[in-house]
Amino acid sequence: MQNQLSLNIIDKKDIWEDFFKNVEKKSFLQSWNWGEFHKKIGKKNWRFGIFKDGDTVGTCQIVKEIAKRGTFLAITHGPTIKNFENLNFNEKYDILNFLFRKIKDLGRQEKADFIRVGSIFERNQENKDIFKKMGFRDAPTFLNAEETWVLDLSLGEEELLKNMAKRTRYSIKRAQREGVIIEKSNNIQDIDKFYKIYQQTTKRKNFASYPIDYLKKEFENFSVDNGVVLFFAIAKGEIVSSAIIIFWQDIAIYHHGASLKKYSNLCASELLQWEVIKEAKKRGIKYYNFWGIAPENQKNHPWQGFTFFKKGFGGFEEKYLKTQDMPLTLKYWPCFLFETLRRKKRYGY
């Protein structure tokens, strides 16, 4: 198969986005707008198409990350291969090996110390063996969520409510009784309102927060296609919960969230999420991705609280292959040690 494959830069948005319309398993972190966002924050990126006999069989968006611990090429929730789950071991290997031989050459040209891949390929032994055969190893940390919670929106509203946990249905009704109001905004200036409670939330939960300029540039890039909405839950004249939701193709993503602890008894966040679900259904969205959740076997994981919250809405878990690293220089190993120690301190494993 390798002799029939070719790799070329895709530099037109419509060609890039059209490919994803015919792919079931995909992520907005490989979208055109996500790449444009990275350009705006000063990062170098590439968009490759993998072709076989003139047809596009896959794509891969790469971002160059420069950090004190090392320079690397990051592939977040990619590459995307059409009908990947239906291919056999050799077919998968041939396509990916062809791609990563080219990316290794790019990495050396860009003086990268390693390649890091956080794909959305299913976490199974076959896929792990494919990456091992190509020279990858498990990364000491993750690029993005490796376990996510997804809701199928093909069901009607009554069925969706029925499938929720009893506590979640109760919380939605309680917020409505308490007079919580949900407002939506497409105004980038309203990021300032979100950021006020976002900072309180990240500090309370001891999470790293993104700078406000980062969030505004992200919002700006997805606004181009009406692909981002700010949701605010308002109670007692104050914003008590908020979320930035990305709408891309047939997927909605709960990308950033924030809430005030002092009003948690009002259950505003549950009502806000219900309004997000209804908005997604109006847009004809197939799936709502609540984003990352804690691994089941790590009861002390810092994400356990919002994992419990997300699962209350019904849905199913998706487990992606663990993030993979391909070392290119000896500088990778000090980085590996540093990230291993940081992970153990932060997550306890």
Image (spheres, rainbow, N blue to C red):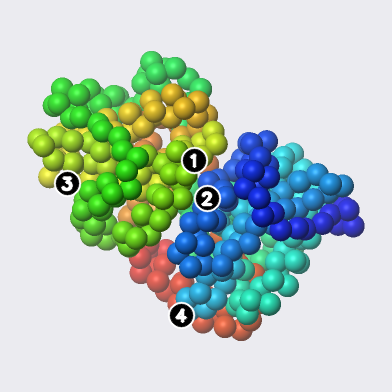
Asked if labels 1 and 3 touch by Cβ distance under 8 angstroms, the answer is: no
Pair 3/1: label in front:
1
Q: Residues within 10 Å of mark 1 (few under 14, many from 20)?
A: few
Q: Is residue 2 above or below residue 315?
A: below
Residue at the extreme right of the image, as rendered: 3
Pair 3/2: label in front:
2
Asked if labels 3 and 4 touch by Cβ distance under 8 angstroms, the answer is: no
Q: Residue at x 9, y 35 (%)?
A: 236
Q: Residues within 10 Å of mark 4 (few under 14, many from 20)?
A: few
Identify the residue under disc 4: 68
Can residue 106 be seen here? Answer: yes
Q: Residue at x 64, y 36 (%)?
A: 21
Identify the residue under disc 2: 33
Q: Residues within 10 Å of mark 3 (few under 14, many from 20)?
A: few
Pair 4/2: label in front:
2
Question: Alpha-carbon distance for marks 3 and 2?
Answer: 33 Å
Q: Position of residue 167 (x, y in %)?
A: 27, 28
In this rendering, would 269 be left or right of 88?
Answer: left
Pair 4/1: label in front:
1
In this rendering, would 317 be left or right of 15?
Answer: left
Which comes before the other along the chain, label 4 or label 1? 4
Asked if labels 1 and 2 touch by Cβ distance under 8 angstroms, the answer is: yes
Residue at the extreme bottom of the image, as rendered: 330
Which comes before the other along the chain, label 4 or label 2? 2
Q: Is residue 121 above or below residue 229?
A: below
Q: Residues within 10 Å of mark 2 (few under 14, many from 20)?
A: many
Q: Is residue 280 above or below residue 348?
A: above
Which amino acid is tagged 1?
A: Asp
Q: Residue at x 15, y 22 (%)?
A: 177
Identify the residue under disc 1: 225
To which quarter of the image does residue 136 belong?
bottom right
